[in-house]
């Protein structure tokens, strides 16, 4: 029996046709890289499963590997082979939290082995998700009752992704991974919406994947399986902001361009899909010093530089930070500060408009001077444990390692992060879609700032995969 009606099928086919029409370099996969349409990604995933993951999993299930070793080895494999997004908050971070809060390690070991064993059928799969979710909820409650912070509890909503990852290792032709991105695209295109019943939701997710594989194979004239249906979702998820003001698709030769979405009008063909408000979706155009927006800023009584700072500050406010804009006309200061008081950290940030790319060397001395005073105040007077310095711009020159090293040595900041502005847009989108599931702390946004260097939209997608 078909789950999708005729209108939903046609919409899904349109998305699939966009994917097939796009050049191979535009495909987005669940990692920080891109893949060609010959599917080397699928071949590599299958190789890692057969040679590393499945033997390890079997060894653990048979008692040859202890839980702690299994957890750390899984982590290492996924860091070396970023094909599933297991490094994110619903994968390895969830695994770490389970092991941390479980007071009975033997019970944890047994519950895990029972849950990750590949189900014989959909009924058993649904039951295992519900049973493991109950276990996760219970150990979280016990953790809080023992006087610990509830923010350290594993989130029950991570269970479908976590278990389906292990099920796919054992039978990749049957069990799709419950990616947040895929769920989001299904919802955006009105194919299906989660109900909150974790077991039933996963089965519906699986059945829609199977139906789409058959539908796409017939409509596309080439075979589709669970992996290639997943590719379609990842392609669409990676291009959701690429609309221009007329509603036409952008030049596909430049898949990195992010343009403000069209306004809703009487002639609009479809309702808006993006959760991102206009002042945030326009940030990439401002960061590139778009000539049309220079004139728009003048008509609005401001400059593009001031608008960029104001809108970036608004983004941090939407994300849930306590913000303090500093900016232009106030001497040698950063553009703003964003504080996560409960999580014990602060962000010092600068917004840089560049038509080409920003090079840190041009502002090094000035930056070090004002970061020194700001970071000293935040750490020593306000007693915040971690301070991060972020530069937000369109893109960056490659020669930033020496500048980052100098800032870290001469100031109190923990890390220096060069943020491509599309990453800010992606963070806001993630927050507005799931406000209660996207925290500011070490199990959420703070993860993105914990390593110096470049931060892209793909890094954000991978964290919330």
Image (cartoon, helix red, strand yellow):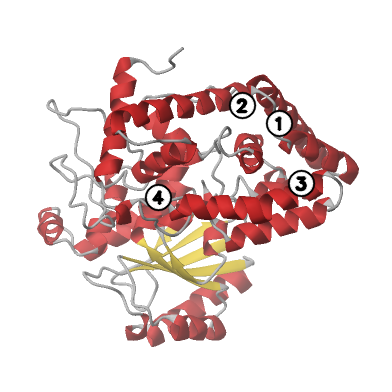
Tell me which residue sits at (27%, 55%) in the image: 255
Q: Which residue has dot 1 on it?
A: 133
Residue at mark 3 to residue at mark 1: CA–CA distance: 23 Å
Residue at mark 1 to residue at mark 2: CA–CA distance: 8 Å
Q: Nearer the viewer, mark 4 or mark 2?
A: 2
Q: Say whether marks 1 and 2 touch (CB < 8 Å).
A: yes
Tell me which residue sits at (54%, 72%) in the image: 415
Along the viewing direction, whichever of 380 and 8 lies nearer the viewer: 8
Tell me which residue sits at (63%, 44%) in the image: 169
Compare marks 1 and 2 and give the one earlier in the sequence. Answer: 1
Identify the image quadrant of residue 140: top right
Q: How many marks?
A: 4
Using residue 258 as the reference point, say whether residue 372 is left or right of it. Answer: right
Of helix, strand and loop, which one carries label 2?
helix
Q: Which residue has dot 2 on it?
A: 198
Along the viewing direction, whichever of 269 and 362 lies nearer the viewer: 269
Q: Say whether marks 3 and 2 touch (CB < 8 Å).
A: no
Placement of 293 over or under 401, stated as above or below: above
Compare marks 3 and 1 and give the one earlier in the sequence. Answer: 3
């Amino acid at each position: 029996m078909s789950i999708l009606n005729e209108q939903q099928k046609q919409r899904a086919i349109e998305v699939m046709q966009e994917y097939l029409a796009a050049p191979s370099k535009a495909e987005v996969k669940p990692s920080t890289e891109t893949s060609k349409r010959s599917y080397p990604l699928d071949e590599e995933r299958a190789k890692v499963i057969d040679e590393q993951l499945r033997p390890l999993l079997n060894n653990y299930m048979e008692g040859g590997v202890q839980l702690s070793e299994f957890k750390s080895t899984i982590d290492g494999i996924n860091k070396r082979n970023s094909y599933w997004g297991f490094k994110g908050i619903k994968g390895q971070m969830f695994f770490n939290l389970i092991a941390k809060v479980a007071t009975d390690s033997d019970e944890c070991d047994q519950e895990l082995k029972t849950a990750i064993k590949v189900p014989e059928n959909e009924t058993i799969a649904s039951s295992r998700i519900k049973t493991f979710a109950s276990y996760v909820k219970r150990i979280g409650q016990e953790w809080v009752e023992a006087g610990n912070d509830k923010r350290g509890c594993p989130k029950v909503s991570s269970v479908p992704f976590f278990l389906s990852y292990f099920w796919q290792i054992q039978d990749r032709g049957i069990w799709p991974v419950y990616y947040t991105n895929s769920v989001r695209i299904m919802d955006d295109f009105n194919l299906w919406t989660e109900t909150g019943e974790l077991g039933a939701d996963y089965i519906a997710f699986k059945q829609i994947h199977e139906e789409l594989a058959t539908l796409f194979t017939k409509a596309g004239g080439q075979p589709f399986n669970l992996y290639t249906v997943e590719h379609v979702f990842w392609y669409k998820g990676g291009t959701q902001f690429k609309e221009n003001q007329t509603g036409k698709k952008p030049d596909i030769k430049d898949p990195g361009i992010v343009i403000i979405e069209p306004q809703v009008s009487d002639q609009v063909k479809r309702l808006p899909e993006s959760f991102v408000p206009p002042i945030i979706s326009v940030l990439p155009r401002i960061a590139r010093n778009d000539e049309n927006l220079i004139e728009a800023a003048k008509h609005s009584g401001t400059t593009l530089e001031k608008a960029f700072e104001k809108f970036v500050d608004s983004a941090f406010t939407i994300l849930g930070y306590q913000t303090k804009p500093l900016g232009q006309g106030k001497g040698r200061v950063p553009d703003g500060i964003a504080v996560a008081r409960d999580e014990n950290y602060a962000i010092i940030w600068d917004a840089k408009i560049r038509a080409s790319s920003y090079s840190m060397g041009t502002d090094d001395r000035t930056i070090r001077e004002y970061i020194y005073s700001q970071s000293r105040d935040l750490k020593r007077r306000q007693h915040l444990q971690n301070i991060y310095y972020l530069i937000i711009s369109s893109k960056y020159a490659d020669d930033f390692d020496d500048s980052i090293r100098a800032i870290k040595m001469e100031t109190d900041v923990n890390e220096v992060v060069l943020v491509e502005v599309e990453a800010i847009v992606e963070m806001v989108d993630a927050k507005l879609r799931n406000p209660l599931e996207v925290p500011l702390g070490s199990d959420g946004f703070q993860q993105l700032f914990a390593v110096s260097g470049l931060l892209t939209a793909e890094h954000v997608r991978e964290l919330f995969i």
